[in-house]
Amino acid sequence: MMQKSRSSLVNDAYQRLKQEIRSNRLPPGFHGTEPEMAERLGMSRTPLREALVLLEADGLVEMKPRRGIYILPILPQDMEEIYELLTAIEPEAAANLAARKLSKEELKPLIDATSRMEQALEDDDLEAWADADDEFHKELLMLHGNKRLLSIASLLFDQAHRARVITLRMREKPYRSTAEHKTVVEHIIEGEIEKARSVYREHRKRAGAELLAILAKYKLQQL
Amino acid sequence: MMQKSRSSLVNDAYQRLKQEIRSNRLPPGFHGTEPEMAERLGMSRTPLREALVLLEADGLVEMKPRRGIYILPILPQDMEEIYELLTAIEPEAAANLAARKLSKEELKPLIDATSRMEQALEDDDLEAWADADDEFHKELLMLHGNKRLLSIASLLFDQAHRARVITLRMREKPYRSTAEHKTVVEHIIEGEIEKARSVYREHRKRAGAELLAILAKYKLQQL
DNA sequence: TTTTATATTAATGTATACATTAAAGTATTT
DNA sequence: AAATACTTTAATGTATACATTAATATAAAA
């Protein structure tokens, strides 16, 4: 949940574990005990537990009483929930930006992100494309400035991350997605509030539906 | 963040502190130290800290390194953020219910909640009205069934609670609000998806705007 | 008296200790 | 051999211990 500094050990544990979960080095289904994990991180159980409590609140981990720590898998239903929320939330931010008539200077991070997406497509570099996509969404939310909206959306991105990475290569090349991002930016620049909202909304709906279709097609029941 | 059982002491501390914050027994600006609070709760610092970490993630409390624990106030800007999110999120749930063509039986909790709102209006009992209103919103989200949506909205309700209670008597009597809830339910029953969405959305926008206007009018800069 | 330096206090951040108890393993009985 | 009872192990939940250090109080210097 977008943690602040906090004492370095708790924060270290939180960041490192989160990163290891994102990168699948701690895969879903992984099971560990506190002494084990504390030792691995080179700290005592106390700060580790505080970090775990946060990761559990983030929905990444479950601490089962007397059974240990489990890394939670992402189920299709989770993706459905996540995309529904993102579909509701993000277009709101896009609409707000359009309403604010921001200068191109201010919108530069967004414009740059779309450029990077295009470049990545040309280079046929899906990783880079995904990074640019991530950046686009985060920049848009940061420009919007609703801290809660940003932190909730970030949480959802974190939860969905593994599934998005894994399915990246199962999708068609994201030409359309890239174009949609550009269109959103154009509407924002032009101050076309409702268009910005609806294009972004459609983008999210389509992206979510596609992802779920892939999970179904490849029978990926958990990631 | 809608905590599960967890070991009872951590959970106790979490629930009790949350309740004390909601009820303003621990008012915004309150400052305490860990030993103090642990003693008051009859436990050691260890479980207390785990609870505090969660409350901090919930945005109710801040743990300032070496300065202690502060109960955070709600600023008008917080309310703005919260209402923006609720405006984006809840109508989605209403639309979904409408799309699902639920039976009146299934919708009973919603229908009952609106009845209670009407009754409370007749009795001129604002507390009861606010309770019924709360219940309406939670029931609607529970019927929808998106766990993440529910837990996020609950978090936002918790954050906004004090401000809503305090301003309850500064508003006009909520006839209009009550009527709007009824209309939403009717649209849900009739399966009118877009109407359910837009009425709910307008309801949230208006309610948010009214609340912010009151904060401005009475110069309530923090609650 | 005001400022600076020093000493004291006490709260946090973290490690460690320990009681409880679920789970796994061993022995006993049938 | 299967089932049951008993032991052992080890992980959690919680308390306590302790080093560090910010904040305060006190003393010394200007």
Image: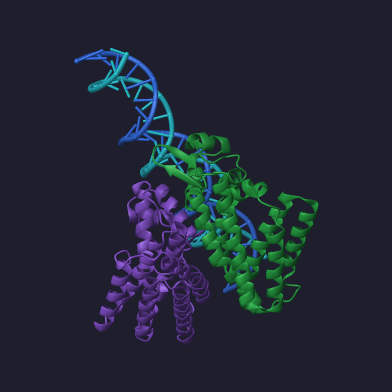
Chain colours: A purple, B green, C cyan, D blue
- Residue B184 at what x, y percent from top left? 68, 69
In the displayed structure, would residue B15 be above or below residue A77? Answer: above
Q: Residue sitting at 70 percent across and 56 percent down?
A: B174
Question: The N terminus of chain A appears in which quarter of the rendering?
Answer: bottom left
Q: What is the tally of numbered marks visible in this picture?
A: 0
Identify which residue, D11 or D1, lies in the foreground: D11
Instruction: Report the residue at 62% width, 64% height from top.
Output: B203
Give the vertical position of A223 relative to A54 (above or below). Answer: below
Q: Nearer the viewer, residue A184 or B46?
A: A184
Residue in front for this viewpoint, A172 or B218: B218
Q: Position of residue B138 (x, y in %)?
A: 64, 62
Left or right: residue B145 compared with residue A149: right
**Residue visible at 38% across and 62% down?**
A143
Residue B122 falls left or right of residue A115: right
Place residue A158 in its image quadrant. bottom left
Quadrant of res B117:
bottom right
Tell me residue B220's x, y (percent).
55, 44
The one of B106 and B164 positioned closer to us in this rendering: B164
Report if residue A26 is visible in the image: no
Residue A24, horizontal then vertical, whole percent: 37, 69
